[in-house]
Image (cartoon, grey):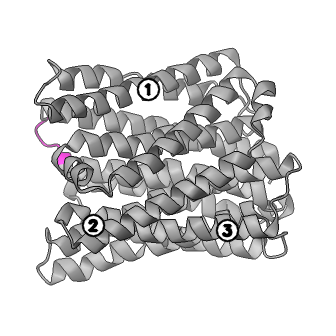
Amino acid sequence: MPLLNLQKYFRIALFNFFILSLVGLLLRWLMISPIKGLNYQYILHAHSHFAFSGWAFMALMLALSHCFIPAKLFEQKNFKNLIWLTVFTAYGMLLSFPFKGYFVVSIAFSTLFIGVNAWFIVFFFKATYNNPKTLSLKTAQLGLIFLGLSSIGPFTLGPIIANGLSGSPFYYNAIYFYLHFQYNGWLCLGVLSLLINLVEKKGFIFPPISSKLIYSLLLISVLLTYSLSLLWNKPPALAYVIGGLGALLQCFALLFLFKTFQWRILFSLPRLQKTLLLLGVLAFTLKASMQLLSALPYFADLATQIRHLIIGYLHMVFLGCFSCLVLFYSIYNKLILVSKPFSTAAYLFIAGIIITELLLFGGSLLMNSKSYIPHFQHILILASAILPPALFGLWFYSKKE
């Protein structure tokens, strides 16, 4: 696809990210001041589905396509239809979930979005069939396989609810199945493939043995760490062992990868790109470390007892790891052209992430020690209010070539 079109579509994804931040801010407000006629749980469903579809899927789809798919294939009308169908389903879910939560319309849009996922998976595998089987491509394809696998979660909810098991461990484990393979499979492996590709384009070739080892570690670790999502229900000790082993293998995979990265390229990067890359890698490292800790019963129990700890973790992965690395890749490859106002908005976005994460994790640690931050929810709202204007600036000041 011509770079101009990619820039146009990525600006749409950025606008979706801005809308997502507004919904997130509304959720923060509803925590302390309910609004008549607005159901918190329904708004939360809209927020999470729009996060995965309107921002994460669309941004990563465009980045992976730019990275791996021959430009001539983007001239096809089918791919443009895929992009607009993504936008249609994303806004369909955003606008339908707040009314009744899961009902015929929202379920229809959710199902259609799963179809969009399948369409892109097939398109990507066909388009890259003749590409060299590099580690970056294999990692991207593995992420897409996990994207497809994640859809099993939503499809099992219907039978679970029909059998009167709503609210049961089966119900929540199906939801966690979806979230796990979205976060740890699709999103994390997707952005990791972009970083690996950057290293490969700098001339580093992973030896076949190293490539196979890293790929195998990533594959096995994602599968095994699903056990960590089951610990809320206090399963047998074997689940802790399996989850811990998966988290340990993930740490080894990242260690092997980061050792090969040519970190000297950081010295030649503009400051904004350097900041986004380092923050994204730091968040990725913290994510792996926290998963390893969560295999210990004490920390697993802590995560189930303190809600803000889970929220902080999910936002760290989504904002700190995924979003920062996607933005880095897009700026580095000129999918976004940077101006001074854009850089200002980007640093404001980074500040918003850091402040909200410090509050969420710091507040959680204080709660664990029976201490509290006075007016915590109000302070958290003020911190969260940094993100919408920052993201509006990213969208508004992202220039088209």
Q: What stretch is highlighted in magenta?
A: 35-40
Majority secondary structure of magenta residues: loop
Residue at the (85%, 57%) spot, across then down: 205
Res. 401 visible in picture:
no
Q: What element carries label 1?
A: helix
Q: Nearer the viewer, mark 2 or mark 3?
A: 3
Q: Is mark 3 on a helix, strand or loop?
A: helix
Q: Which of marks 2 and 1 is in front?
A: 2
Quadrant of the image occupied by residue 49: bottom left
Above or below: residue 216 compared with residue 69: below
Q: Position of residue 338 (x, y in %)?
A: 71, 25
**Circle on res. 230:** 2
Q: Which amino acid does label 2 sit on?
A: Leu
First-in-chain label (2 vs 3): 3
**Which residue does the numbered mark 1 point to in the structure image?**
354
Residue at the (13%, 77%) spot, across then down: 165
Q: Which residue is nearer to you in this view: 338 or 98?
A: 338
Q: Which residue is nearer to you in this view: 29 or 325?
A: 325
Is the residue under label 3 in contact with that under label 2 (CB below 8 Å)? no
Q: How crowded is mark 3: few (under 14 residues within 10 Å), some or many (20 or more)?
A: some
Residue 15: say if magenta: no
Q: What element carries label 2?
A: helix
In which quadrant of the rendered image does the N terminus lie?
bottom right
**Which residue does the numbered mark 3 point to in the structure image?**
213
In which quadrant of the rendered image does the C terminus lie?
top right
Above or below: residue 274 compared with residue 107: above
Q: What residue type is labelled 1?
A: Ile
Res. 302 visible in picture:
yes
